[in-house]
Amino acid sequence: MARMKTPVTLCVTSGKGGVGKTSIAVNLAFALVQKGQRVLVVDGDLGLANVDVLLRLSVQRTICDVLDSGADPLESVIYLEESLGILPASSGVPEMVTLGPEEQAQLGEVLTSIMSHFDYVLVDTAAGIGPSVLWFNRFVDHNIILLSPDPTSFTDAYALIKILSRDYDRDYFYVVFNLVSSEREGRQSYKILEGVVNKFLDVDIEYLGAIPQDKVIHKAVREQLPFVQQAPQSNAARAVFDLADRIRMLKEKQD
Amino acid sequence: MDQFRELQESCPLKNQECPVIDELRRLKEDCKRLQELSQTDALTGYFNFRYLLSALEGEMERTQRTGLFTSLVMIDLDYFKQINDTYGHESGNKALQWSTDIWRENIRRIDIACRYGGEEFAIILPGTRLPRAVHVAERLRIALADSPVELDGELVRLTASFGVDVYKGRENLSAKAFIERTDRFVFEGKAKGRNCVCFEEKEIAVVPTGVTDEEKKALFNNPIGLKSERDNSKGFL
């Protein structure tokens, strides 16, 4: 008998902006879809959306409309492919950044109501450590901390892990490095982060992979197309496919 | 009375003097006065215990909905029994009025000052974080300690012990439980020697988002070195 499956929910988050959250979230979604999964991407940057920009979407309804005027959340999902839905957010709506508890509860209900149609729900959070970022991080099952090997990105990612563990009871984080010059740099950077986290925080972190700097990424962003489709043989795309494989193992564990 | 003018004009005979309307107006005035009485403490003019409970419940609900914290300050006058025993109950009452008048001048219009019972008081500070509430309590403590009252021709210095706590809406808590939780800090203040403000120190000592210098050092003073490994020749632009 088929049992009702709950999707794997993940968020890509970083503290610092400009690390590549949206790009990685979108390409990871495409990679998972290519492997036969149904994926919903939620633009968690509720006030300054950019998933739609990255994908050249023409947005009719957003999360904001769902919350404000009760638009049907399922109808707000834009399907790029049969198994790839995008729930877009609004651009330039500052109220959405400071979600109050009541709106958070409402958002939780909305997401829960549409989640069962997918195998994966991937939230691309905003930068910073604002209420919506913290809320999405608590809402999902798995937190992917994305960082680049820059000192500021390190500090912000560490600060985010610290807040989530101390104030919001999260105790397991997946770490992905973006914009590395080599796989080796990714691993070495991870070792440093792991050392500091183990020394100061009571949480476990797990290395999930590294995405190399690659010209195709910039080109894809400018052309508003996913690089896993534009250049599937590039180093960056191959790294994202590897990442997708590891994430599918999370689902196997969960099921 | 302006608020009852409509009533006056509602006489079907359009009489200026209408005994029925007059009676109705008196009843309405009585009702309003009784309503005020039912939620006010006669001696101090503060809200009474019943009002404290319902107002605090309301504010805690607001916290759950808006995320704005509600702080509570509980106050107990020090050595009040001795004042009663030494100077008599009338002086005791005077001490209560004296203290509550001073505190009233030192809180905001939105704060809700209540008599909890006997010589104990509660002040609800809506939309207020703990450090701010502690600051207010400290101001109330100093204001009272600096203004001796004249009892029986004698200048008497009054002091009180303060407990402060905050409700952040993260847990389900009744108004009563919140009061009791805050009251524990009053007992702590009594044990510490009175005339002081007690609260959960660790709530304030920790900066919520702080990455310490030690942590930063560990992140950057590593043997491998983050930068050295980067192969910049491969970078774009």
Image: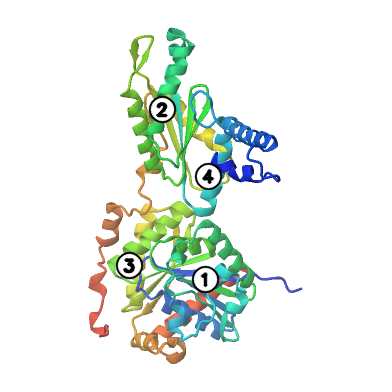
Of circles 1 and 3, which is in front? Answer: 1
Rounded to the nearest angstrom, the CA distance separating label 4 from label 2 is 24 Å
Q: Earlier in the sequence, mark 1 or mark 3?
A: 1
Q: Are marks 4 and 1 on the same chain?
A: no
Local SS, label 4 = helix
Q: Amino acid at mark 4?
A: Glu
Q: Amino acid at mark 1?
A: Cys
Q: Are marks 1 and 3 in contact (CB under 8 Å)?
A: no
Q: Are marks 1 and 2 on the same chain?
A: no
Rounded to the nearest angstrom, the CA distance separating label 4 from label 1 is 27 Å
Q: Residue at x 42, y 79 (%)?
A: A23
Asked whether residue B182 is in view, the answer is yes
Q: Amino acid at mark 3?
A: Ser
Rounded to the nearest angstrom, the CA distance separating label 3 from label 2 is 54 Å
Of circles 4 and 2, which is in front? Answer: 2
Rounded to the nearest angstrom, the CA distance separating label 3 from label 4 is 39 Å
Give the image location of residue A150, x and y in percent. Answer: 29, 70
Mark 2 = which residue?
B101
Q: Residue at x 52, y 57 (%)?
A: A101
Local SS, label 3 = helix
In the image, residue A127 sits, relative to residue A35, either above or below, namely above
User: Disc 4: which chain?
Assistant: B
> What number is the disc on residue A204?
none
Mark 1 = which residue?
A64
User: Disc 1: which chain?
Assistant: A
* Quadrant containing the N terminus of chain A in the rendered view: bottom right
> What number is the disc on residue A153?
3
Q: Residues within 10 Å of mark 1 (few under 14, many from 20)?
A: many
Q: Amino acid at mark 2?
A: Asp
Give the image location of residue A175, x and y in percent. Answer: 42, 68
Mark 4 = which residue?
B59
